[in-house]
Image (cartoon, rainbow, N blue to C red):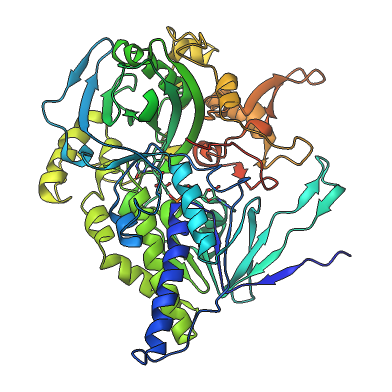
Amino acid sequence: MIEREQLEMDVVFVGAGPANLAAALHLKNLIKEHDELIERGRRAGKPLGNLEIGIIEKGANIGAHILSGAVVDPIALRELMPDFLEQGCPVDSTVESDTFWYLTENRAFASPITPPPLKNHGKYIISLSKMCEWLGEKCEEAGINIFPEFPGAEIIYDENDRVLGVRTGDKGIDKEGKPKENFELGVDLLAKITVLGEGSRGSLAKQLMQRLNLNDGVEAQVFSLGVKELWEVPAGNFEEGKVVHTLGFPSDTQTYGGGWIYGMKNNIVSIGYVTGLDYKDPLIDPHAEFQKFKTHPKIAEILAGGKMLKYGAKTINAGGWHTMPKLYADGVLIIGDSASFLNGQRIKGIHTAMKSGMIAAETIVSAFDHDDFTSKTLRHFKEKIDGSWIYDELYAVRNFHASFQSGRWSALINGGLQFLSGGYAWGFMPIEHHVAGHERMEMLKDYDYQGDALAQRYPDLKFDNKLAFDKVTDVYYGAVSHNEDQPSHLHILDTEICATRCAEEYGNPCQRFCPAAVYEMEENAKTGRREIKVNFSNCVHCKTCDIADPYQIINWVTPEGGGGPNYKGM
Ligand SMILES: Cc1cc2nc3c(=O)[nH]c(=O)nc-3n(C[C@H](O)[C@H](O)[C@H](O)COP(=O)(O)OP(=O)(O)OC[C@H]3O[C@@H](n4cnc5c(N)ncnc54)[C@H](O)[C@@H]3O)c2cc1C
């Protein structure tokens, strides 16, 4: 039997996103400060300079799996590193103008005032992937060990459910599950504290929440899917530093959705569309919604004569404060998007993810100082969050997404009332708050389904591969690759349901909600019936399938390390 290697560390961060990178760097800074104070006799306690800190990342390199808009509010970045600009933070542009457009099918109405939550003047347009790459370098310079191509596959617990660390994924297993020549068993990374910062719908965070019931007493999380392309457009089509947010076309009034266009340097435009994964109509296809968005005359005008450079898609946890799980347990903390720190009203989560990581770092220093890594000490994380600006920001918008579950108009009225009252106004709120998206999807019988969902829901949408791209072409622009000789990392727990109940009741919506053409219904030559085929190598790691499947039978687990999209520069 091959022995599994064990690596003992003090703190292991799972995922190299802004939350964990800020957490690890801040931890190093705090340790330095702590040790200096002890050395100068101004603080009691033991020096912590020898702590071993590691970050594991499933992508081939730091930033490879990072996808965002992105306009960043630099508040947390400034707290982490006041001279971030001098230290080379790769800011692309400064926001010079903000506009909000309401789109009807053929027209765009510019709002005379930009809704205050969408005011971004003076903030920065960035590639979050580039920013994470840079933060990763800063972490390495500070002595933090970074392990790309290391997916956290399992959480290691002791007999009392205390978290002892993570087991990384095995390498070199063929599609039948047998070891290949390059087989390598995953490593057990043991740590006194494990920090999960895996982003939206973290696969380990999901396991942990289920096992330790961390969601008890909180509302169901709700998610959206953001589909994005980077375009190079002719000079003069869209100014650098210009930010446009849209509402309306092509979403129907019952579906949460909106678009963005951000002007970057060198005539690059970040354009994308967000669709709430709590939509009712089973024929909705979020990728098609985005493609349709680009055909609006006002949007098509911006892209005219340009070319698409890159593609990506990722989910966003939109529920906010009321859907935040318990943030700690013995030996573990959850931060960033995995723990619902995103502000859905501003569609911003980078600054809150970073700040949650920095507060986690403060909690970790105090845990080492007291030599106690149980909930008794780690509970201070939540107390510190409650006393920080994160609370002020997220609590005030706690009802934002739930009000959209009653439709766009009630949401707009509610949104206004909530803004004026700091989140208290109720108006048209549904009685139940934040109903999980998969529970809201309606069955086909209500939709007079004709057998071709795209043709029925999007009759005018043509994938000309100039303005509107089909999924397979887009996946190519996401530079997605997985070794195909490995077991699928998309586990369908009961494929019989796909061929029978799901086909009949929902028309296999996975074919539509997946933005990467992973799921296909294909005729089985032997049985003559249509069965599910999973093209897992297309997967962009957005986690939509794990979230939106109405039967909750798709389980997303980490594939072999390094596989997935390459969002460098996105
Ligand atoms: C389309 C879109 C547009 C957005 N626009 C904006 C915006 O304009 N401004 C803004 O502030 N916010 C925006 N956000 C939100 C923002 O991107 C997130 O809030 C932020 O990235 C969250 O940071 P995080 O570190 O928690 O997670 P992520 O950024 O998701 O990082 C998680 C990292 O963990 C890795 N990982 C996951 N699981 C594992 C595992 N098991 N093992 C190893 N590694 C793992 C992932 O590969 C990834 O690198 C947007 C999000 C999306 C999707």
Residue at 48% in and 37% down: 314
Foreground residue among 48 and 7 = 48
Asked whether the viewer can see residue 120, the reply is: yes
Q: Residue 209: x, y in percent?
A: 50, 59
Foreground residue among 412 and 281 = 412
Residue at 45% in and 84% down: 369
Q: Residue 312: x, y in percent?
A: 50, 31
State whether residue 544 is above or below residue 354. above
State whether residue 407 is above or below residue 6. above
Asked whether the viewer can see residue 492, the reply is: no
* Quarter that holds the N terminus: bottom right
Residue at 71% in and 39% down: 488
Residue at 43% in and 76% down: 32
Is 47 on the left or on the right of 298, as rendered? right
Q: Residue 421: x, y in percent?
A: 11, 49
Is 299 on the left or on the right of 2, as rendered? left
User: In which quadrant of the rendered view does residue 99 lie?
Assistant: top left
Is 6 on the left or on the right of 470, as rendered? right
Foreground residue among 153 and 450 = 153
Q: Residue 476: x, y in percent?
A: 60, 24
In the picture as drawn, the residue positioned furthest to the front comes out as 86
User: In which quadrant of the rendered view does residue 499 lie?
Assistant: top right
Numbered disc total:
0
